[in-house]
Amino acid sequence: SFAKVLHSHDRYIVTYGGRGSSKTDTFYLKYLLELFQPYYFKLAYVNKEKANIRDQQYAGFKRVAKRIGLFDSLKFYDGDYRIVNPQNGNAMIPKGMDDPEKTKGLDDITAIWWDEINKGTEEDFTTLNALLRSPAAEYLQFAISFNPVSETSWLRKYFFDENNAYTLNDNFKGIAYLHHSTFRDNEFIDQNAYHDTLLQN
């Protein structure tokens, strides 16, 4: 279940799982709802390639906002892919990590979500993480999501226990929430049909 991801205010959220597990849609829902909270909230949503933002995360936020009836309450800027709640000023702003000025415009952010962070580097992560320091934040959070990675990935060494790929290492104990998912966690698909597709592949 993704309920704990939706409600988590942990400093870090680490979610990984195969395609079709609905982890990405969970973050769309989570952060759309945060735009309506009574506290200040400003999310940077990250893609390794700026060119992919429109067709991936921005389109996903739009799709889920329509599904849950929040689309008309938000302002979607098709020019720069910002999403703003005009009632309280809470916002989500996109950031492509292939932009030479990758940290420009990320003032006073309270949260970062990087989907497919396995396409980035450890340096990308630490650079962004250093920006999470807004004194206006109700909570600070860096959420990452990715498909399973190889043993040689920097993510494996940076976040996970050396002897157990399903456990966070001591650096993240008590400050991070770990969630592993499969397509069985996705309530929006025909799971039996998807299972057959996976077997065929």
Image: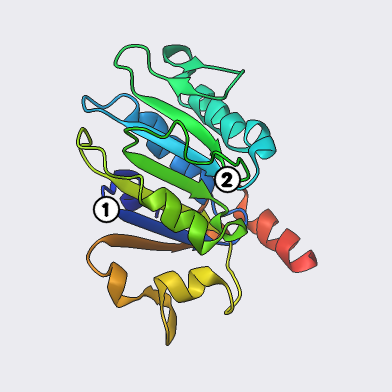
Q: What residue type is labelled 2?
A: Met
What's the image's color scheme? rainbow
Q: Mark 2 points at which residue?
A: 97
**Left or right of residue 190, residue 115 in this image:** left
Label 2 secondary element: loop
196 or 138, which lies in front? 138
Of all residues, the one furthest to the front in this rendering is: 100
Residue 108 percent coordinates (x, y): 31, 33
Q: Mark 1 points at which residue?
A: 10
Q: Which amino acid does label 1 sit on?
A: Asp
**Left or right of residue 182, residue 43 in this image:** left
Q: Indicate which label's residue lies in the foreground, 2 or 1.
A: 2
Q: Distance between the residues labelled 2 and 1?
A: 24 Å
Instruction: Say which residue appears at 23% left-offset and 36% top-offset.
Output: 137
| Quarter of the figure with residue 84 | top left
36 or 112, which lies in front? 112
Q: Are marks 2 and 1 in contact (CB under 8 Å)?
A: no
Crowding near pointer 1: few (<14 within 10 Å), some, many (20+)? Answer: some
Give the total number of marks visible in the rendering.
2
Instruction: Say which residue appears at 30% left-offset and 61% top-offset.
Output: 176
Residue 140 percent coordinates (x, y): 27, 45
Q: Which of marks 2 and 1 is nearer the N terminus?
A: 1
Label 1 secondary element: loop
**Left or right of residue 193, residue 43 in this image:** left
Residue 23 percent coordinates (x, y): 50, 50
Of all residues, the one furthest to the bottom in this rendering is: 163
Residue 190 percent coordinates (x, y): 62, 49
**Is residue 187 visible to the viewer in this orientation of the structure?**
no
Crowding near pointer 2: few (<14 within 10 Å), some, many (20+)? Answer: many
